Image (spheres, helix red, strand yellow):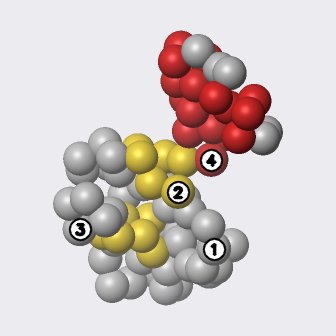
Amino acid sequence: MTCDEYAAMRDDQVEQRYQQWVQEHAKPCPNCHANIEKNGGCNHMTCTACRHQFCWLCMEPYVANHFNQEGPCHGRQFS
C-alpha cells in the first residue's frame, strides 16, 4: 500500500488491517500477552516486554532440555 492509500484509510480500517496481520503473523506471549512476531531463528523465544522465555511451537515455558531427546518439542528447535 502506498503512503497516499494509507492516509486515505479511516482509523477503523487501519485497526482492522492491523488485527488481521496480528492473527496471521503473531502470537501472544503466554505470560504478559504482548504480541510476538517470529521472523526467523530458533523456536526458543524471549518476550521483549516481560522477558519470559517460552517455546514458539507449544507456548510452554522454556527449560534447558526442551528441544533435547527428553523434551516436549524434541528435535524441533529450528523447525
Q: Residue at x 64, y 29 (%)?
A: 7
Q: Quadrant of residue 16?
A: top right
Q: CA distance from mark 3 to mark 4?
A: 20 Å
Q: CA distance from mark 1 to mark 2?
A: 9 Å
Residue 46 pos. (x, y %): 35, 70
Q: CA distance from mark 3 to mark 1?
A: 18 Å
Residue 48 pos. (x, y %): 31, 65
Question: Of callouts 3 and 4, which one flags the residue occurring earlier in the amino acid sequence?
Answer: 4
Check whether the beta carbons of the residues at disc 4 and disc 2 lie within 8 A of each other: yes
Compare residues 40 and 12 and report the one nearer the observer.
12
State left or right for residue 36 relative to residue 53. Answer: right
Residue identifier under label 2:
37
Q: Residue at x 23, y 68 (%)?
A: 51
User: Callout 4: 10 Å neighbours few (<14), some, many (20+)?
Assistant: few
Compare residues 26 and 5 and report the one nearer the observer.
5
Q: Is residue 20 visible?
A: no
Secondary element at image label 1:
loop
* Amino acid at circle 4: His
Residue identifier under label 4:
25
Residue identifier under label 1:
40
Residue 58 pos. (x, y %): 48, 55
User: Callout 1: 10 Å neighbours few (<14), some, many (20+)?
Assistant: few
User: Callout 2: 10 Å neighbours few (<14), some, many (20+)?
Assistant: some
Compare residues 59 and 67 and report the one nearer the observer.
59
Secondary element at image label 4:
helix
Residue identifier under label 3:
51
